[in-house]
Image (cartoon, coloured by chain):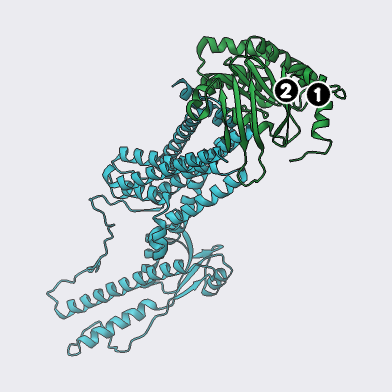
Amino acid sequence: MLRLLSSIYKEFLVLIRDRAGLAILFLMPLVLILIMTLIQDATFKTVKDANISMILVNNDRDSLGEAIREGLIESKFFEIVEELDGKKITEEMAKEAVAQGKYKIGIIIPERATEAIRGNVNALINKSFKTFDVPGVKKRTKKSTIDIIIYIDPATSYSFKNSVMSSLKEFTSQLEIKMFFKNFSLALADMFPDQKAVEFESFETIKYKEIYASTTNSEILPNSVQHNVPAWTMFAMFFIVLPLAGNIIKERDEGSAFRLKTMPGSYVTVMFSKILIFLVVSFLQFLLMLMVGLYVLPAMGLPQLEIGPHKIALALLAISSGLAATGLGVAIGTIATTHEQSSTFGAVLIIIFAALGGIWVPIYVMPHTMRIFSQFSPLNWGLSGFYDIFLRNGDILTVLPEIVKLLLFFAVMLMIAIGYNKLHRTK
Amino acid sequence: MHENQPIIEIKHLTKIYRGSNKPAIDNISLDIQPGEIYGLLGPNGAGKTTTISILCGLFNPTSGNVFIDGKDYTHSAESIKSIIGVVPQDIALYPSLTAKENLTFFGHLYGLKGKYLRSRINECLELFGLEKNANRKIKTYSGGMKRRINLIAGILHKPKIIFLDEPTVGVDVQSRNVILEHLRNINKEGTTIIYTSHYMEEAENFCTRVAIIDQGNIITEGKPKDLINSKKEYTDLESIFLQLTGKALRDE
């Protein structure tokens, strides 16, 4: 017991005196998670609710122009710019400003657009009620089209352009319908004077409601925070392979390992204390990342991490992931002969595991064959366990397969290390 | 030859490293009596470190046996390890830990503890003139200081047998004298010392018996004085050494 405690204390001292190593262990994942979440959230925001300045040239100055203008302002997607240097923007100015890349988008609503719509509506009403003479509605049957011109910065991304276009289409078609019914009801009111004119405020019978499929009632949406926090936590936890393997190799290079091997009962004790210390480190990393998700990201205007109700399952999953990572570290540290070998191999291996495991590219967008391979990444086991707990309210039983896989991985890695050591004795 | 039971018996020891066809040591047999200071001498690559590594239980020989205090590593590795002390050629300590922290850790591994361990550490540090630097990190030590603290780590638990692999390499005269003097004192208290070196003059004065090894074989073995007197042309150990191992440079 004294041996173990002393070994743990020794590992603790070695760890805390390596300032650079400590910084890498705790700052790197922190920076990584912040950058990754902000980057992905920014892409997400580009099409959602980031303020993008847009030029609006409203030559119509009637209902349609006003409605589009109000709709755009209300949507909060865009910041509407109508004046430049105190002057009303003309179509020419708008085109130039967008061409120069000053604004991403410019919308020109042509003159008499509202009149044209009214004309079209009236034409339709006249057509429908040919037999009646509707007073106040001009006799017209000719239809005219309205061209709303949109200038787009060529550097704009395709998805951004598409989302702007679809938002615009939605406004205009709603407006058209609204106008049609307004005039239609006015016409009807004229025909049947005892009937009161009906106001058509909105005409949205069919609406879409998005609900993410979940076995329970909870509806936590997998936003950038829900993906990135567990993903990069797994990544960071597995990156302790590098300092751990480095620690083992350093001990061997410095000769202390040689001395330890000539001392009673020490190899297992020393390895055990290393695993324990690095397990604690990985758990602290996990807690740190959790705190970032719970408190730091919301403070930066990102959504808060939802961790679900099963905290014990979460802790067990984190510990199993930590053990899998330390096991890998021990195996690499034992087999690699130099620092360079272990850091290059270790880093590349973890990056491959991360790529396969869906840390960068979610598994459901991977091609089928790659999805099969992703089953072999321990990072994938951990990540899907976290998804189960965070998104699907999973409990210990739900994540048991993942925990078992991670623990088995740990056991296999230890056996490889021990086996290699035995082999080395008979070199 | 002594009559009593040798503390170390080496019987037909052969070690061929994997991937090599030449044995590093070839059918070596040796008996070392309790209380001796035994020198394993030889040029670079002769097989000294291989022999000592097998004696310390670091790896298994290809064939042959080693008995330490009547026990062998296959059956009683743990009990052998608790009675031997090893002073490796490299400084086998944690550079970022202080002398005291290093010694406390290794002391604990040997099962020493509490007050006894603390006073033993202080005693050893004083003996080797390191008490003032007890709380300095090893990486700030000079070469000679590192050698001395490396030695202390191997003798802290008062082992029955001490293995020293080139303990005086790269050490100034003062440090070397301190080291040898204390080893002699330890030996007088009954500790057997096995040591490797290629400083012939040092070995001649220090060792009670020596074996000269070359290319994995023992060329000659005995008390330094007996060896020097065995032939007319021998004047000291160095002359024997050069005569027996030749003057060609040794790299491997």
Q: Colour of chain B?
A: green
SS for dot 1? helix
Q: Is residue B122 left or right of residue B205?
A: left
Q: Is residue B88 left or right of residue B243?
A: left
Q: Is residue B143 left or right of residue A258?
A: right
Q: Which chain does tag 1 point to?
A: B
Q: Which mark is residue B210?
A: 2
Q: Is residue A383 above or below residue A91?
A: above
Q: Which chain does tag 2 point to?
A: B
Q: Colour of chain A?
A: cyan
**CB within 8 Å, label 2 to label 1:** yes
Q: Amino acid at mark 2?
A: Val
Within 10 Å of the Cα at label 2, are there few (<14), some (14-19), or many (20+) other Cα atoms? many
SS for dot 2? strand
Which percent across, then down, holds residue A199? Answer: 22, 68
Q: Which mark is residue B214?
A: none
**Residue denoted by label 1:** B237
Q: Is residue A393 visible?
A: no
Within 10 Å of the Cα at label 1, are there few (<14), some (14-19), or many (20+) other Cα atoms? many
How far is the residue under mark 2 from the one under mark 1? 10 Å
Q: Quadrant of residue B200?
A: top right
Q: Amino acid at mark 1?
A: Leu
Report the front residue among B52 and A296: B52
Q: Is residue A241 above or below residue B168?
A: below
